[in-house]
Image: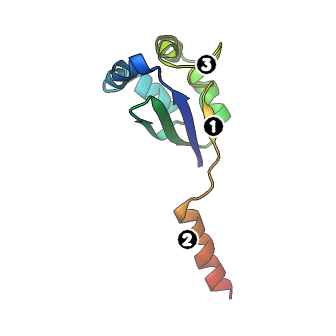
Amino acid sequence: MRRVCFQLQVKSDRIEEYADRHRAVWPEMLEALAATGWHNYSLFLREDGLLIGYFETPSLEEAQAGMAATEVNARWQAEMAEFFEELGEARPDTGFVQLQEVFHLEDQLAAAHEKQWNE
């Protein structure tokens, strides 16, 4: 599984409403995300609107393409786009800034244990 972390900026006057919308995401949207490879998906929102998202997927490209093919995603993205700064023509699910992973505890522990066994 690939770990994907991303950021977006929620408009300061829309932060509370954005959080409210995510307390009751449409069931068909939740099902579509799970069916198209968005696993262990979480969003974290800072007081100033910085949004950090994290999910695991076999393929980011396939997960995005799978969602793009659903009608529910088109509706959800159209409604959510107005909450974000600096998206331009991109949809939120494709216009995010992907962050580079620089540390993962389990990966480094596994590598350290493997090195120990090989010495």
Residue hosting label 2: 109
In-image side of 75 versus 24 (left or right): right
- The residue under label 1 is 98
Inter-mark Cα distance, 3 to 2: 38 Å
Q: Amino acid at mark 3?
A: Leu
Front-lying residue, 22 or 102: 102
Q: Residue at the spot x=51%, y=11% of the render?
A: 78
**Up/down of 88 relative to 43, above or below:** above
**Contact (CB < 8 A) between labels 3 and 2?**
no
Asked if marks 2 and 1 touch (Cβ < 8 Å), the reply is: no
For the residue carrying disc 2, how many other residues have a C-alpha within 10 Å: few (<14), some (14-19), or many (20+)?
few
Q: Secondary structure at mark 2?
A: helix
In front: 84, or 1?
84
Give how far apart the Cα atoms at labels 2 and 1 are.
25 Å
Q: Secondary structure at mark 1?
A: strand
* Residue where numbered disc 3 is placed: 87
